Image (tube, rainbow, N blue to C red):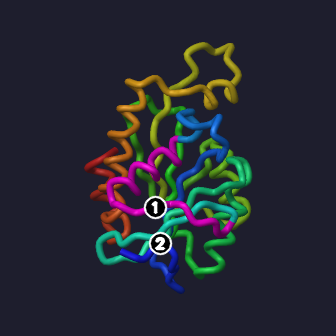
Amino acid sequence: MFGINKFSSSVDFMVVGLGNPDKKYERTRHNTGFIALDYIADKRNFKINRLKFKSLVGEATVGSHKVLFLKPSTYMNNSGQAVVEAMNFYKLKPQQVIIIFDDISLDVGKMRIRSKGSDGGQKGMRSIIYLSGSDEFPRIKIGIGQKPNPNWELADWVLSKFSDSELKEIEKMADNANNALELIMDSNISKAMNLYN
C-alpha cells in the first residue's frame, strides 16, 4: 500500500469510475462508477481523496500491480479530459485503463465485462473514446435498469436516485467488479467474463 501523500512515478493500471462530482448526484444511477470505486476503496482500505488530473485519485496495489483509481471531477460528459490527462502522464495504453460505468441496457443486479467496444450511448465513455482516439478500453458495465416509462427523459432517469434495495444490488456488483480487477489486469479477462457476466 502506498502512503496517502506520496504518488509513485509509475502505475501499471488505472481504474476509472464515471460519475458527477456534486453532492446532489450521490446515489444517482449515473454515479454508479463512483459508487463502485468508493466500495472498492473501502474494501481494499485506501482513500480516493487527492486532487490530480481534474479528478479525485488514490493508489493501491491489486495483486502484483500498482494501480491509480480515478474519479473525474469534470462531470460525466467531459470524463475524457481527466482520463486522457492521466493516461498521458503515466504513458498508459487504453488496454491498461479499466472503466467502470452505468448501463441502462442491463437490469440492476447485472454486470457486463468487455475488453473493448463502442460507448453504447454512455456519454462519459463517448468522451473518453473521442479524446483518446481509441475504443480499446476494458470496461465493467453495471446495470441501472431501463426507464420505467418510455415518456421519461433519459437524463431524468439516469439522474434519479437508487432505492435502498437497488443500492444493495449495486454494492454486490461493485464487489464482483472488485474481484474482477485482478483477473483483467492479469490478462484473464475471459475468465472474468465467465465468472461475472
Q: Where is residue 13 in the image (x, y as percent from the top left)?
A: 47, 72
The residue at which mark 2 appears reads as: 4
The stretch of residues the image draws in magenta is 32-53
Residue 196, position in %: x, y? 30, 47
Residue 180: image location, x then y, percent: 33, 56
Q: Which residue is drawn at 41% across and 77% down?
A: 2
Instruction: Tell me which amino acid carries mark 2.
Output: Ile
* Identity of the residue furthest to the bottom in this view: 9
Within 10 angstroms of label 1, few (less than 14), some, or many (20 or more) residues?
A: some
Q: Between 145 and 191, which is closer to the camera in this rendering?
A: 145
Disc 2 is placed on an element classified as: loop
Q: Can you say which quadrant of the picture contains the N terminus? A: bottom left
Pick the residue in front: 87 or 133. Answer: 87
Marks 2 and 1 close (CB-CB < 8 Å): yes
Q: Is residue 168 above or below residue 31?
A: above
The residue closer to the viewer here, 24 or 190, is 24
The structure residue drawn at horizontal position 52% and vertical position 57%, both measured from the top left corner, is: 99
Image quarter (top left, top right, bottom left or bottom right) of the C terminus = top left
Kindly report the distance in space between the C-alpha atoms of the residues bearing marks 2 and 1: 7 Å
Within 10 Å of disc 2 (Cα), the crowding (few <14, some 14-19, many 20+) is some
Amino acid under disc 1:
Lys
- Give how far across and how far down residue 143 sits, in percent: 46, 35
